[in-house]
Amino acid sequence: MSATSSVAATVKKSLRLDFSQSDPVVAARNAVGIAVPLVIGVAAGSIPVAVFGGVGAMFAAFADRPGSYRLRFSRMGMTSLAAGIGGGLSVLTSHSVLLSLLLIAVFSFTSGMLMALGPVVAQIGIAGTAVAIVLNRFELPPASALGIGAVVVAAGLFQALLAIAGWPVHRHAPERAVLASVYEALATRTRSPHPKMMTPGAGVKLDAARATITGFGHGHGPSMQSYRGLLDEAERIRLEVIALAYCLERFERVERSTQADAVHALLLAAGRVLDSTAESLRKGKVFDDSMMEPVVEAVERLRDIIGDHPDSPTGRFASLHARALAGQLRACARMVTPGAVEGRIAEKPVTVGGIRVAVQAPFDTLRANLRLDSAIFRHAMRLAVLVTATDGLARLLPGSTRGYWISLMVLLLLRPDFAATLLRTTARLAGTLLGLGIGTAATFLVGSGNPYALIALVVIFVFGVRISGTPNAFFMSIWTAAYLVALLDLSGIPASDVALPRLVDTVLAGVLAVAATVVWPAWERSYLPTRLAELLASYRLYLAAVSDPAASKASIDAARIAARLARSNAQTSLDRTRAEPVAGLATQYVGEGLLVQSHLFIQAAMVIDAARLSVSAAKGPVERVLAPLEPFIADATTTLKASEAAVLAGVPARGAVNLRDSYTRLAESLPEISPQSATVQPAILDAADRIANSVDTMVHLLRERSATAS
């Protein structure tokens, strides 16, 4: 694809519609949350209170995302607090250009670094930085700093209270529905008397699910991670069911009824688990773990029956795939609840022997990224330099009290890569042009002397912003521009004085942001395989460290920090690849799958880490606990090394070991070798099960990618 074609594709992509993440209930609630402080301010005769309250409520509205009530309130509350602190400090430093620029530089750098914790957390930093940029340019007395900050925070908290007063919002209903259809189709096939002869309906549903879950505009976060993991497991479950159906057919052909009945019983039990998975997704309820008990019993019965016929190749084949199917069903049982409940039910903290398993350590993640080889750190530095420089230069322009718009747009438009920045800039420019026209015309019609009519316009425009959703940047920009015109008109700045300067400033900011990303001339998709290989290597080294009895605390801590840095770099690289309009879908798809599975892998590795700590705290023999793991860890290391090479070369993982077999050998040996480790042994065995499934799924993804390319 030529450069011109790529740019044209980016422009076209920015104008596409995707309302999968839009919710009219949330949009209406956010509009009401902004209307209330505006009405209170106008009724009290204080337009500044109304405007500052509207700003705080707007930033809190952007943080109104699905999740448990506690999570939603904390997210919106932190955003409101950041906006209030940014506004208050901005007013305090507004008398000094040097202090003002230093404040903006610190806030901008912090916003960039917070991207290491995800876009939702980064939004908190952006809110504080944006308010600091805007309020810094108005001549407000320092004594009013505390009051202004309090108004911004109060309005945001009111918006948060509205969010937790309503019923939970199911934004991911389309993803859950399409994934439930996949599992229902798998269940129907699995329960069939002759599953090998069923029409291949699951394949079509898998394609539809993949388009919904990984297609344009798909969401992010824990729920989406669960859906992606379930999608990958569905692919593998389908293959295992077909393999067992082949064994069933062979047993029936040679009249081995005992073996055939055992395989059929396993498939029936598996079908019920798949049905329960689909039901959890459709109804948004917690998965019933007891559904897995018949599967475990069926696998054990099949193993016993096959053990009576050691010379049967079909029997050994059936036993192998029965264990693999059971492992995949266990993985589904673990992953389905977070996606089904969409964060409405808080997960209990995981502990092993009294030691908490800290899957996410935000401060450690930020500290790991404070180095030049971190993509997050480089982006934060560039953001701080460019936002601060444009803010300083804009002060030299005529009408500098409104020159903040350039640095504000740079903050909102600048992304680590060219394609994402161009995408946002294109949408913002086109949307701003239309939005300024709509806002100017609307405010002209209602008249500047009617504040309540202007508030009504603000409410309508805010509803438009929130109903557009993140994927529709073009339409969101339209209503955002119109909202700002109406809000500024309410504050006493006529729309006629805003439209042209805003458009010019947006163009300048877009040109600067795009020009800044040109210094990264290569497409990110060429770097993604290296980042993924580095991620797998760092996770392999971390697993080796936590499973080595002789490893010191310092070496384990260093491996953990390196793993966090590698994950941040890989996630950032994948985000950039998603935004590129050039061909790279296969690389992106594999990257998304590997990131999901690697997350499951590292969670399991941290369970081993926690088990190790609990044994040490009890003055127990760490060697006795970890020694049985050596063969399994060796096989996992071999397979991860093969996967690293496969990611870089774009080929299947050659020399990979089937970890399901390794796990089976480990499970059989543990009771004999270490029967006294009753507290940590079940946790370690469960961690090994998760590692086996995640690594085997990575190998499957790489094999599938290679087959698709061929």
Image: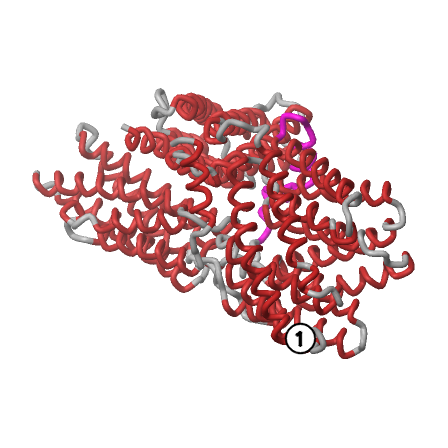
Q: What is the x, y in percent for residue 334? A: 45, 48
Q: Nearer the viewer, residue 129 or 404?
A: 404
Going by the image, does 277 lie left or right of 500? left
Crowding near pointer 1: few (<14 within 10 Å), some, many (20+)?
Answer: few
Going by the image, does 139 lie left or right of 341? right
SS for tag 1? loop
Q: Classify the position of the C terminus by image quarter.
A: top left
Q: Nearer the viewer, residue 20 or 456?
A: 456
Going by the image, does 513 lie left or right of 318? right
In the rendered image, the vertical position of residue 28 relative to residue 1, given as above or below:
below
Residue beneath the point at 60% across and 69% down: 31
Q: What is the x, y in percent for residue 57? A: 68, 64
Q: Bounds of the magenta span? A: 348-374
Going by the image, does 86 lie left or right of 349? right
Question: Residue tagged by mark 1?
Answer: 447
Q: What is the x, y in percent for residue 114? A: 66, 42
Does 597 lie within the magenta span? no
Let me know if residue 168 appears in the view.
Answer: yes
Q: Nearer the viewer, residue 222 or 320?
A: 222
Residue beneath the point at 70% across and 76% down: 451
Most extreme residue toward the right is: 143
Let me know if residue 664 appears in the view.
Answer: no
At label 1, which amino acid type do we have? Gly
Q: Nearer the viewer, residue 354 or 213?
A: 213
Q: Classify the position of the N terminus by image quarter.
A: top left
In the rendered image, the vertical position of residue 312 relative to residue 280, given as above or below:
above
Residue beneath the point at 75% across and 67% down: 491
